[in-house]
Amino acid sequence: MFHAKRLQKELIKIHQGLPPGIHLVAANDFQEWQMDIQVLDENPLYYGKTYRLKFKFSNNYPIEAPEVMFIRATDRDIPMHPHIYSNGVICLDLLSSGNGWSPVQSVESVCMSIQSMLTGNTKNERPDGDDQFVLRTSTSLRNIRFVYDDNTV
Amino acid sequence: MSSDDEFMSDQLSDDQYEDDDYSLGELEEDDDRYLDDVKDEKPSKKAYEVDYKVHSDEQIRAAQQIQIEEVSSILGLPGEQCAILLRFFKWQKDRLIEKYMDTPDEVLEDAGLGPGYEAPAVLEKLKGFSCEICCDDERGLETYAMKCGHRYCADCYRQYIESKIKDEGEASRIECPSEGCSRIVGSKTIDLLVPSEINHRYRELLNRTYVDDKPNLRWCPAPNCEYVVDCAIRPTQLHSIVPTVQCSCSHQFCFGCGYADHLPCPCLLVKKWLKKCEDDSETANWISANTKECPKCVSTIEKNGGCNHMTCRKCKHEFCWVCMGPWQEHGTSWYNCNRFEEKSGSEARDQQAKSRASLERYLHYYNRYDNHDHSAKLDKDLYVKTEKKMTTLQSSSGLSWIEVQYLEAASKVLQQCRQTLKWTYAFAFYLERNNLTYIFEDNQKDLEMAVETLSSLFEMPTDQLANAKKEMMDRTAYVNSRRIILLEDTAKVLAEENWKFTVDLKQ
């Protein structure tokens, strides 16, 4: 299996060490992993908080992008961000196969990108139309078509 | 006409001269002469007809090749690179050459080519290589990189490209798998890495983007048809012309909007009409024309008989249908409202009368439109029956195959005229009333009568059909001439922009 081999290698590398603020929570199989991330500077929006990310891999990973979203758990909330919906869905071109995703990306590099996306944010707000989006979004992220037009945050 | 269109037509005339021994210089001169000839030969082009050509898949591919080679000889770049440049510039050859002459490096970079020549695409085995995608580091692993130097194992590269082509339908803008590298994967790489059926799909997709990028080309919308129509009519001209074309597969359609032949109705009116027929705007009109709301609970009530003393089924409120006031106030004047002439009441009635008139107007046109639409479908069945009649006629009357062809011709004309009549009603719906409208309606009436007469001839039993041959042929010719007159007149006024429509055609 193509994706298993690659994830195996990623796992070995993760066990050798991860950048500060990124931790592996669970990697019991090659379908779904969970990661915790923290923002390391003193950004008051996220200071002292930890957030949990869920990664879902298809058999075509890393040719195809993984599905990545924030999930709620004990002591884990969904971070406030103008590109993160309150159900945890993240609007980021990097996470879409037809747009910014490259097979060279990895779980670690995605975590780092999301970490820096939070670090650079100063707006304590949700995306436009968050309520409606959350209401009609199905559980599959694959069918959501985002338009990536905002490069400011 | 923009310059690249001229090139297209030049180039396709070139094809026609392919077998002749002209040198290039002579050819160009000859082209002009050829175009003049066309004008002289066909002075009788109808006002509603447009110039167009139909190209096959191969011709479209060849046309691209010729342009690639021409650009290649001007810029002195390999064909592969010119193909990528042309696609990036949406086949605007002159713009590409101009930009390239000004800032070659910038153009190459923007198009995803970068400086220097592409080395021949080859697989390499490198010592100590580890693929960044699958993390494989076996010895003897075959690897590939374009000249950007981002090297991955051949398997990963192939999987990546296949996924782009198969899952995303991407062809002209497949980028290097590396993050942030926008180097375009060209056809040499594709040839080297992917299996033939996916390569075939890749070429198909490239062909499709070519047709999509050129405003003068459009795929025939008929199912399974692979022809492309080349027509110079631009979207900005659609208010003054209805560019109807016929593909080599015999499907007739509008080049402007892709919808089946809708002469004489301009595209914008077709769009509005279809939308109007689909949405509920006329249902709302019916409701306002035929119902009132209970003054108390606003339930919608249709009065279908009886006196003016209404009792709402829902809230039991009693009121007068005429003045909408409470019934008690009417005292003893049962069944007769003496407050009839009140101003508010008369305003409400005017409003209702307007709704009613507008609805009636719409229904007038819609019923006739729908009737011809329906008849056209029946005529299709008729065509099948005609074929049977033709065979019976051949055996019973001893007529040869060629002698019974008049039946098929008549049936085809009939269908076409029904189609035209159908759209004359949508057209008329949006017309403002003036002298031109009367002429149009006369033409419409003449065509309609001619069509119905021809249609009735088809109802004859087969044994009488043979004797009616002359009449049928005459009728067919007459119907056809009526259609041409109607289309010709309508198109002329349209070209002069003299029709007055109730909506703005230039929206």
Image (cartoon, rainbow, N blue to C red):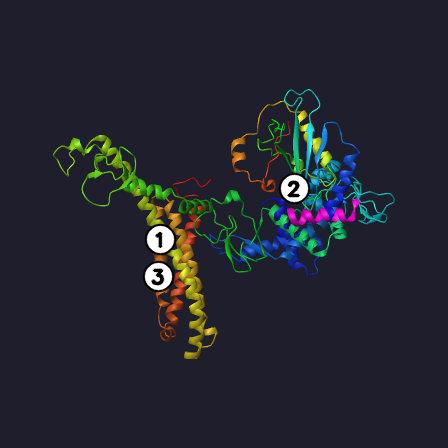
Q: Are marks 2 and 3 in contact (CB under 8 Å)?
A: no
Q: Magenta segment: does it hold B165?
A: yes
Residue B74 visible in the picture = no
Q: Which residue is mark 1?
A: B368
Residue positioned 61% across, 54% down in the render: B33
Structural crowding at the residue carrying mark 3, measured as other residues with C-alpha within 10 Å and reported as few (<14), some (14–19) or many (≥20) = few
Q: Position of residue B304 (x, y in %)?
A: 24, 45
Q: Amino acid at mark 2?
A: Gly
Q: Which residue is mark 3?
A: B452
Mark 2 or mark 1, whichever is nearer to me: 2
Q: Is residue B476 above or below residue B192?
A: below
Residue positioned 39% across, 51% down in the render: B424
Write down the region rendered in magenta: B152-169
Mark 3 or mark 1: name the one nearer the start of the chain.
1
Q: Which residue is mark 2?
A: A98
Q: Secondary structure at mark 2?
A: loop
Seen from this angle, which residue lies furthest front?
Answer: A74
Magenta residues, dominant SS class: helix
Q: Magenta segment: does it hold B82?
A: no
Q: CA distance from mark 2 to mark 3?
A: 56 Å
Which of the two residues, B385 or B284, is positioned nearer the viewer here? B284
Mark 3 or mark 1, whichever is nearer to me: 1
Q: Amino acid at mark 3?
A: Glu
Q: Position of residue B484 (x, y in %)?
A: 42, 57
Q: Is residue B189 above or below residue A139?
A: below
